[in-house]
């Protein structure tokens, strides 16, 4: 019995020593890799412009970029301006209450972009709650498409594709859905 305990102790000590050696080797390997990586950085390496922008932002700006907000008016008010200027929000969402017509929508979008452009290298995301049909926020002169139920009931893949394409084309004209 005493002999068996001795073997277990030796096995435990041997295992412990092996683990310590492996940990030490791993740390030395990491250190060597870090040295090699820092020495081998080519001077003409391609930089990531998004990483550069993110690295230049404060923590408040990074948090703000994750936020999107809606507002109550059909034009930029003081509260909206404050959210863009002071809180660095990443985007706004427009609802029916924000949209009167095509020209007003264009003016609103341009004002939002103008306020943001003086402050940030990153563009502000302007979106609209638009599904087509019953949930249509866009003025008729911009968007007059069948709703999703009508498209589904038509059971026509080509129609669905054309409607999607039309939404895409209209969004390229200044409104992101």
Image (cartoon, rainbow, N blue to C red):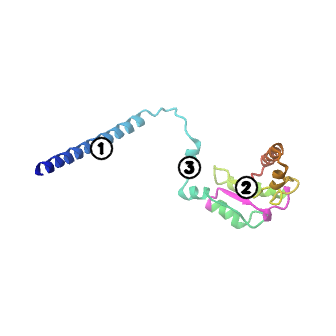
Callout in the foreground (1, 2): 1
User: Which residue does the numbered mark 1 point to in the structure image?
Assistant: 23
Report x, y in % for residue 34.
Answer: 39, 39
What secondary structure is marked by label 2?
Answer: strand
Observer-nearest of 49 and 66: 66
Q: Earlier in the sequence, mark 1 or mark 2?
A: 1
Is 75 left, or right, of 26 in this rendering? right
Return the x and y of residue 89 as percentages of the image width and height: 64, 58
Q: Is residue 143 left or right of residue 66?
A: right
In the figure, 124 relative to 69: above or below?
above
Name the residue at 67% across, 50% down.
Answer: 123
Residue found at the far front of this picture:
1
Helix, strand or loop status at disc 1: helix
As for residue 91 lying within the magenta part, the answer is yes
The image quarter containing residue 11 is: top left
SS category of the residue bearing label 3: helix
Residue 49 among magenta residues = no
User: Which residue has dot 3 on it?
Assistant: 54
Q: Residues within 10 Å of mark 3 (few under 14, many from 20)?
A: few
Question: In this picture, is 54 found above or below 86?
Answer: above
The region drawn magenta spans 87-102
Residue at 61 percent across and 61 percent down: it is: 87
**Residue at mark 3 to residue at mark 2: CA–CA distance:** 22 Å
Q: How would you rate the neighbour count of disc 2 (Cα within 10 Å): few for under 14, some for 14-19, many for 20 or more?
A: some
Q: Is residue 39 left or right of residue 87?
A: left
Place of residue 92 in the rendered image (x, y in percent of width and height, measured from the top left): 70, 58
Q: Indicate the position of residue 124 as horizontal and vertical percent values.
A: 68, 53
The label on residue 127 is 2
Residue ID at (69%, 53%): 125
Give the mark nearer the N terminus: 3 vs 2: 3
Rendered residue at 53%/49% (across/down) = 55
- Residue at mark 1 to residue at mark 2: CA–CA distance: 52 Å
């Amino acid at each position: 019995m005493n002999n068996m305990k001795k073997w277990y102790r030796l096995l435990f000590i041997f295992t412990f020593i092996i683990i310590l050696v492996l940990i030490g080797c791993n740390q030395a390997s990491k250190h060597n890799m870090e040295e090699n990586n820092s020495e081998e950085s080519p001077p003409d390496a391609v930089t990531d412009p998004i990483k550069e922008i993110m690295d230049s932002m404060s923590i408040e700006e990074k948090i703000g970029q994750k936020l999107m907000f809606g507002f109550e008016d059909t034009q930029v008010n003081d509260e909206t301006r404050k959210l863009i200027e002071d809180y660095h929000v990443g985007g706004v969402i427009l609802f029916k209450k924000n949209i009167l017509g095509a020209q007003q929508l264009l003016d609103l979008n341009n004002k939002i972009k103008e306020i943001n452009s003086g402050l940030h290298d990153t563009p502000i995301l302007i979106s609209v709650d638009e599904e087509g049909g019953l949930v249509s926020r866009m003025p008729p002169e911009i968007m007059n498409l069948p709703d999703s139920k009508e498209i589904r009931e038509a059971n026509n893949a080509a129609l669905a594709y054309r409607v999607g394409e039309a939404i895409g084309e209209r969004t390229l004209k200044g409104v992101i859905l």
